[in-house]
């Protein structure tokens, strides 16, 4: 079999890649543009700017991991590839945050779902935030371009049983469902997207745009943390960065100064507001770090009569948008239904429990299905999102209060998920909640769900989607950047990641990030070349 | 990150957290959590990572270098793990000791990747549980951890799981999550979840499993 190890081959061909852990002296490096972050936004930006002939430096806090490191093992992957070793949570600890920290960012560990920004969302942005240029019609060619770049297409193999249960349940209840487009090429249908694709099938930033940039002379520093942007009058003069040691988490003491004409922050909706807060970037209207969104997720597990083997097969291939916009774009909160893959470590961490009860839960893993509901936050006055601020050590943290508006949606979602699972033949269903048991009929589950306390820590909450915090908009009074990701106050600063979304997306966000980054980078390349 | 202070906003600073946590916990919990690390330090609780410790005295593998857990933390998990993952532990005493020791080592190496902020949170939690006064008054565990029975450890976990105080629920989740993940996620115990591991044909075919 011919090797498709793009990274290994690129390194051998002489790409400019510097591992921060190997640096022994402080130094200053210069380029036309410094791009902070190598995920969906940063990778796209770097490739487009480098192809336009600009010199580009890519800065990544995480390390470069690729096929040689991807051995389908949860523990090593969670420790190395995820933010805070998979321990990231909201400030009060009530919501677990799954987010990548490696070259490729979250696209290296996501489950490959590739949705366009829903029309309802784009139209809402046009009406509410003065973003008329982002209508579905105007954006269509940009979506098409990115779908082609990342090989996105509806999954053409049969869904695994875990996903098929969602399909069956929706079909028998008359709820709409569809097949998920995935960004894969030659996928083996193994089920290990979340721990780094072992076969180089996933067409995330790691195997597409980052190599594209490196093939055009970009210089990647990994294991290098962006500490602060330093202003000189009204422009950013330089980025100060700290090299991390070989463990990826302990600074080595070496600092690197990066100078450029233009700086693009693409460090995620938690990392970018954090960087700009640390840098005291002008924020005359106090908008920085505000309106942070996450698609709050709750879950329901089911004990099925036939084997599910939820650890094998493409992790996400079926979804339902039946409840996403059912009551209008800004009515009671809507939710998208999907399924998560269930491997032993993830399952034992997500389902709360200990002792014999937990042993019994885990023993039934091969028969377990799980459905998750992703709430569409940010479209209603009672869903203003959270706030990013800095902890004592300078690291960013998300404070995310859960409003009654969201609790109502979470309770409805528990009902829907139980209904779908029983309709697909579940023997028992358990909402993932501290006070829930296993229920053997829909009636029993419904009665229990009506009584479950909707409270922090009791409801087990998760998110893999971080958005907002540097919201875009036409009016500087209520946004951080304009509709092209250009900072309202600082002329040589752009933001090209999910932090510019003025609401959540209402779908897995990677394609939204790729697309806006491509559009805004194309404009930036023209400006910088001119 | 170096100490880079930013002008506090009204929402996200430490004092806001303390106030909210205190309201949530009612009397005591937050106050203890906030101060116990200092108290524990003053009263001589072991707060340095255990480093390499001999197998003889501690049942640990001396080749493992602890970077976060202290000797007290190790005793805490030796007491808690039988209640958290006990049904899956081997019955044969030596195998059981090794399974517990290996799980504690994986807990330590996992926490090493957590970063300073979450490590500080765990340090406060572990110090609260290890410091005698707070162990008794907050966790309501009367014996020191090496003398706690599995049923006493289970009763403690149940109190924190079912408590109406959010901070105790959070502590329960922290203790059980890091333990469950380090145990059920490890190859030797995959069989407890009926997980056969990565498909053999893929392991056979992929280069990363064969290039040394």
Image: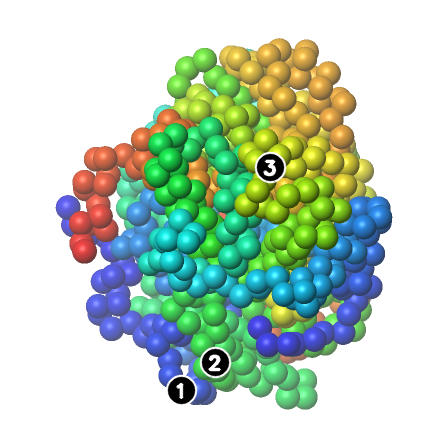
Task: Tell me how far mark 1 sits from mark 2, CA to CA.
Answer: 9 Å
Residue nearest the viewer, comparing B158 with A410: B158
Q: In the rendered image, which residue does mark 1 sit on?
A: A25
Residue A80 in view: yes
Q: Is residue B25 left or right of residue A522?
A: right
Q: Is residue A418 left or right of residue A446?
A: left
Q: In the rendered image, which residue does mark 2 sit on?
A: A253
Tell which subunit mark 1 falls on. Answer: A
Residue nearest the viewer, comparing B34 with A129: B34
Q: In the rendered image, which residue does mark 3 sit on?
A: B153
Task: Tell me how far mark 1 sits from mark 3, CA to CA.
Answer: 51 Å
Q: Are marks 1 and 2 on the same chain?
A: yes
Residue depicted at x 75% and y 22%: A450
**Comparing marks 1 and 2, which lies closer to the viewer?**
2
* Image quarter of the N terminus of chain B: bottom right
How busy is the neighbourhood of tag 3: few (under 14 within 10 Å), some, or many (20 plus)? many
């Amino acid at each position: 079999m011919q090797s498709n190890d793009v990274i290994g081959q690129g390194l051998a061909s002489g790409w400019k890649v510097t591992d921060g852990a190997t640096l022994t002296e402080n130094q200053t490096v210069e380029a036309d543009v410094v791009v902070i972050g190598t995920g969906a936004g940063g990778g796209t930006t770097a490739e487009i700017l480098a192809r336009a002939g600009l010199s580009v430096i890519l800065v990544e806090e995480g390390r470069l991991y690729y096929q040689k490191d991807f051995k389908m093992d949860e523990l090593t992957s969670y420790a190395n590839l995820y933010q805070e070793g998979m321990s990231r949570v909201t400030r009060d600890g009530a919501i677990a945050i799954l987010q990548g920290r490696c070259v490729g960012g979250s696209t290296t560990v996501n489950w490959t779902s590739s949705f366009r920004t829903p029309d309802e969302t784009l139209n809402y942005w046009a009406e509410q935030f003065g973003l008329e240029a982002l209508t579905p019609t105007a954006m269509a060619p940009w979506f098409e371009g990115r779908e082609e770049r990342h090989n996105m297409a509806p999954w053409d193999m049969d869904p695994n049983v875990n996903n098929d249960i969602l399909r069956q349940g929706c079909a028998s209840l008359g709820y709409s469902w569809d097949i998920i487009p995935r960004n894969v090429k030659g996928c083996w249908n193994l089920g290990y997207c979340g721990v780094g694709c072992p076969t180089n099938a996933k067409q995330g930033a790691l195997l597409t745009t980052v190599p594209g940039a490196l093939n055009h002379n970009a210089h990647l520093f990994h294991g290098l943390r962006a500490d602060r942007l330093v202003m000189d009058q009204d422009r950013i003069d330089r980025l100060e960065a700290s090299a991390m040691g070989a463990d990826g988490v302990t600074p080595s003491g070496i600092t690197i100064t990066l100078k450029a004409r233009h700086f693009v922050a693409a460090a995620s909706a938690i990392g970018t507001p954090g960087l700009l807060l640390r840098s005291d970037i002008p924020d005359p209207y106090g908008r920085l770090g505000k309106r942070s969104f996450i698609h709050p997720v709750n879950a329901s597990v089911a004990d099925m009569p036939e084997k599910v083997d939820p650890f094998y097969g493409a992790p996400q291939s079926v979804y339902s948008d039946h409840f996403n916009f059912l009551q209008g774009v800004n009515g009671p909160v809507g939710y998208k239904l999907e399924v998560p893959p269930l491997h032993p470590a993830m399952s034992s961490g997500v389902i709360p429990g200990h002792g014999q009860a937990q042993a019994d839960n885990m023993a039934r893993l091969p028969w377990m299905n799980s459905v998750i509901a992703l709430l569409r936050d940010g479209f209603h006055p009672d869903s203003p999102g959270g706030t990013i601020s800095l902890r004592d050590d300078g690291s960013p943290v998300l404070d995310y209060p859960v409003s009654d508006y969201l609790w109502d949606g979470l309770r409805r979602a528990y009902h829907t998920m139980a209904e779908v699972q029983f309709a697909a033949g579940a023997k028992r269903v358990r909402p993932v909640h501290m006070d829930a048991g296993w229920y053997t009929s829909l009636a029993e589950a419904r009665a229990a769900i009506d009584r479950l306390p909707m409270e922090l820590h009791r409801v087990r909450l998760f998110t893999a989607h971080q958005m907002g915090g540097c919201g875009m908009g036409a009016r500087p009074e209520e946004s951080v950047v304009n509709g092209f990701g250009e900072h309202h106050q600082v002329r040589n600063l752009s933001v090209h990641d999910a932090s510019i979304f003025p609401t959540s997306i209402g779908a897995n966000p990677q394609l939204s990030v790729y697309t806006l980054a491509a559009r805004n980078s194309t404009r930036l390349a023209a400006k910088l070349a001119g | 990150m170096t100490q880079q202070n930013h002008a506090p906003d009204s929402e996200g600073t430490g004092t806001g957290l303390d106030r909210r946590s205190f309201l949530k916990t009612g009397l005591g919990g937050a106050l203890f959590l906030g101060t116990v690390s200092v108290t524990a330090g003053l009263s001589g609780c072991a707060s340095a990572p255990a480093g390499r410790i001999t197998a003889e005295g501690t049942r640990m593998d001396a080749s493992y270098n602890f970077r976060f857990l202290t000797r007290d933390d190790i005793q805490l998990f030796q007491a808690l793990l039988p209640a958290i993952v006990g049904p899956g532990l081997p019955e044969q005493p030596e195998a059981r000791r090794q399974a517990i020791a290996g799980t504690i080592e994986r807990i330590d190496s996992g926490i090493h990747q957590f970063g300073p902020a979450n490590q500080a949170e765990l340090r406060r939690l572990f110090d609260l549980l290890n410091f005698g006064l707070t162990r008794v008054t907050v966790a309501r565990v009367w014996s020191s951890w090496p003398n706690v029975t599995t049923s006493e450890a289970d009763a403690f976990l149940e109190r924190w799981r079912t408590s109406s105080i959010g901070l105790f629920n959070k502590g329960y989740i922290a203790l059980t999550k890091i333990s469950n993940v380090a145990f059920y996620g490890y190859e030797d115990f995959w069989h407890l979840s009926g997980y056969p591991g990565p498909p053999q044909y893929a392991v056979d075919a992929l280069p990363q499993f064969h290039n040394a």
